[in-house]
Amino acid sequence: MSRTVIAILLLALVLVAGAIVLLTLPKTTTKPETTVTATATTTVTTTVTTGPSETKPAKKVSLLGSGATFPYPQIAAWIDDFTKKHPDISINYNPTGSGTGQEQFFTKVVDFAASDPPISKAKWEEWKGKFVQMPFVIGAVVMTYNLPEAKGLLKLDAETIALIYKGEIQYWNDERIRKLNPEINLPNKRIIAVHRSDSSGTTDVFTNFLHKAAPNVWPKELVGKSIEWPVDKLGNGVGGKGNQGVAEVLRTTEGSIGYVELNYAVELNMPTALIKNREGYFVMANETTIMEAARGALARLPSSPDGDFSGDLDAILYAPGKLSYPIASFSHLLFYTSYPEDKVAAIKEFIKYVNTEGQEKVIRGYIPIPKEVRELNLKALDIIKP
């Protein structure tokens, strides 16, 4: 065999062996390049997300409050408006009643609370310097009723109301009610006295009024956020939870009478009785008569939000003045004087809003606080610290 043939055969063998090797190798095509590119992209993304703090989304602050149902519609309206303007702040308010609100506040379950009556002097002394309170809106407790037969607005005084809730006046055509309403044809229908079943600032305001205006009929023992109602023992009393619950019982029970916050009566178009004031005039709850009652209370307020407000209910309730509505009341917000760093700014923003812009957005059934009270409340901004 010539050398030329041998060379050709060897070259052929090399080519065949090379082809076999290539066929058995894994197919990598362009994957190495893709992998490198992906790694580079991931590195860039990681660098961006872990960069300077100002590139991070703002941390949302959540505030929790509870308490009075009396001002709940107003608080809810403010929270809705405020959080739209401050999307980084979330506020949840639970209308548990003033009693529960105070309890949760002083056990530090919530960040703030609302209470119709101010904090008692004894509690204020116990917590002095650790919290602030501020009257933030003025409201009124009204007597409303479900009596289709009565044409015209009823007139009532504290003594008659007290006798109804003691169970001593049981029928609508009782002579003591007829004497106050000679122009109304009152039916011989049993009276169902509706009251709050929960611990309530509205009840505290209402029973304080009865005792202050009719002390010989309504004793001090029957004053408070939650009491044993004498009318219940006769089977003529019904309890409802919150202002909402009382309003619902009234709407569905003919012959009933009850006390609710003015806003609920207004929104539900419920009739409200004219109440006899200290000067002997029967007045309806409205902006004029409620503000008249509030004016006399200003001199009784302390000079600082961390002061003692325990006397302001007595000052505004059954106040003198021909036009004064006798069952008016401030509602109060409670805040601590110290908060965690992340909540301080949010709390202060909310306080500022309530006492400035918020007072221009008071809904129907409530009365804005006077300028002097707003200025007093804003002093809390210098008191509250991290």
Image (tube, grey):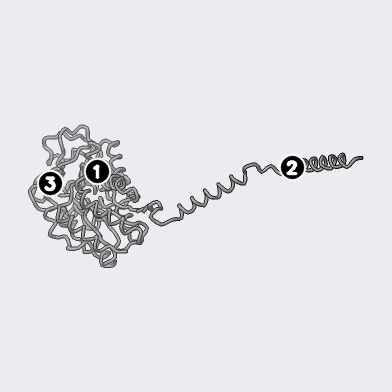
The local secondary structure at tag 3 comes to helix
Q: 121 and 161: which one is in front?
A: 121
User: Residue at 81% across / 42% down in the picture?
Assistant: 11
Label 3 or label 1, whichever lies nearer to me, is 3
Q: Is residue 145 above or below residue 116?
A: above
The local secondary structure at tag 2 comes to helix
Which kind of residue does numbered mark 1 sit on? Gly
Q: Residues within 10 Å of mark 3 (few under 14, many from 20)?
A: some
The residue where tag 3 is placed is 289
User: Residue at 22% across / 41% down in the picture?
Assistant: 144
Q: Is residue 128 above or below residue 237?
A: below
Whether residues under marks 2 and 3 lie with C-beta atoms below 8 angstroms apart, the answer is no
Residue 258's label in the rendered image is 1
Question: Label 1 vs label 2: CA separation?
Answer: 96 Å
Residue 6, by quadrant, is: top right
- On screen, residue 11 versus residue 97, left or right, reads right
Question: Label 2 vs label 3: CA separation?
Answer: 101 Å
Q: 221 and 196: which one is in front?
A: 196
Q: Position of residue 31 (x, y in %)?
A: 62, 44
Question: Label 3 vs label 1: CA separation?
Answer: 21 Å
Q: Is residue 235 visible?
A: no
Looking at the image, tell me whether mark 3 or mark 1 is earlier in sequence order.
1
Looking at the image, tell me whether mark 1 or mark 2 is earlier in sequence order.
2
The residue where tag 2 is placed is 22
